[in-house]
Amino acid sequence: MEILNQLLAIDINYIVASLIVLYFLMENLFATQFKFNKMPQHPLHNIMIQVMLTVGGYFTAIVLVSAIDWLSLHRVGILHYVNMPVWAKLLLGVAAFDFTNYWFHHMVHRVPLLWRFHRAHHSDTRMDASTNLRSQPVELLIYFGIANLVAASVFGLDVIALSVFFLVITPYVFREHTNIRFPH
């Protein structure tokens, strides 16, 4: 549990910055399917978008953590009434957050009103590690606010499961958006 606490104490912004630098270097060192002359400017534009969204993200995080703490305190959700080891609840919690976020992502591609917000992410002219940062504020509220609040209230998840979910998913989504050919 001590190792988990140490991992969760890491500021996620350091992880994000490290991943951007790592993947940006890899995209420039290894052969990718796209090359263009203004490579350094491209991530700068996406990073500037992310800087503008950071304030809204902090507000959403404060509200989300407070709401999930309230739900946990009042034992709202299925896992509060199931007797199992803490590690199993944590694994199920991370899986439940991932499951819910998957379906919310599916919805933003299928529901026209939600697609209007999500298409800002897809409007990037060249996908690279910084593409993951390209989002619209309402979409962030949907993904990181509403989706996770729904998961916490239905499944009975806590802030620790949410933190582990973000710790696991963050490197994955950056790798998923890189312009590097990984072996299958």
Image: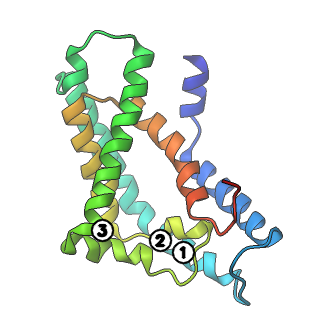
Quarter where residue 24 is shown: bottom right
Element type at mark 3: helix
Question: 98 or 11, which lies in front?
Answer: 98
Q: CA distance from mark 1 to mark 2?
A: 6 Å
Relative vertical location of residue 148 with respect to residue 45 in this rendering, above or below: above
Residue at (61, 22) in percent of width and height: 3
Residue matched to label 1: 46
Q: Which is more N-terminal, label 2 or label 1?
A: 1
Q: Position of residue 162 (x, y in %)?
A: 39, 37
- In the visual, does 4 lie left or right of 81? right
Residue 70 visible in this rendered orientation of the protein: no
Q: CA distance from mark 2 to mark 3?
A: 16 Å
Q: Which is more N-terminal, label 3 or label 2?
A: 3
Element type at mark 2: loop
Q: CA distance from mark 1 to mark 3?
A: 21 Å
Relative vertical location of residue 89 with respect to residue 117 in this rendering, above or below: above
Residue 105 visible in this rendered orientation of the protein: yes
Residue at (70, 88) in percent of width and height: 38
Residue matched to label 3: 109
Q: Position of residue 131 (x, y in %)?
A: 54, 70
Q: Are marks 1 and 2 in contact (CB under 8 Å)?
A: yes
Residue at (61, 71) in percent of width and height: 128
Name the residue type under label 3.
His
Quarter of the image containing the N terminus? top right
Q: Are marks 1 and 3 in contact (CB under 8 Å)?
A: no
Name the residue type under label 2.
Arg
Task: Name the residue furthest front.
Answer: 184
Q: Which mark is residue 134?
A: 2
Name the residue type under label 1.
Asn
Q: Position of residue 12 (x, y in %)?
A: 55, 46
Q: Position of residue 149 (x, y in %)?
A: 25, 43
Q: Comparing marks 2 and 3, which lies closer to the viewer?
A: 3
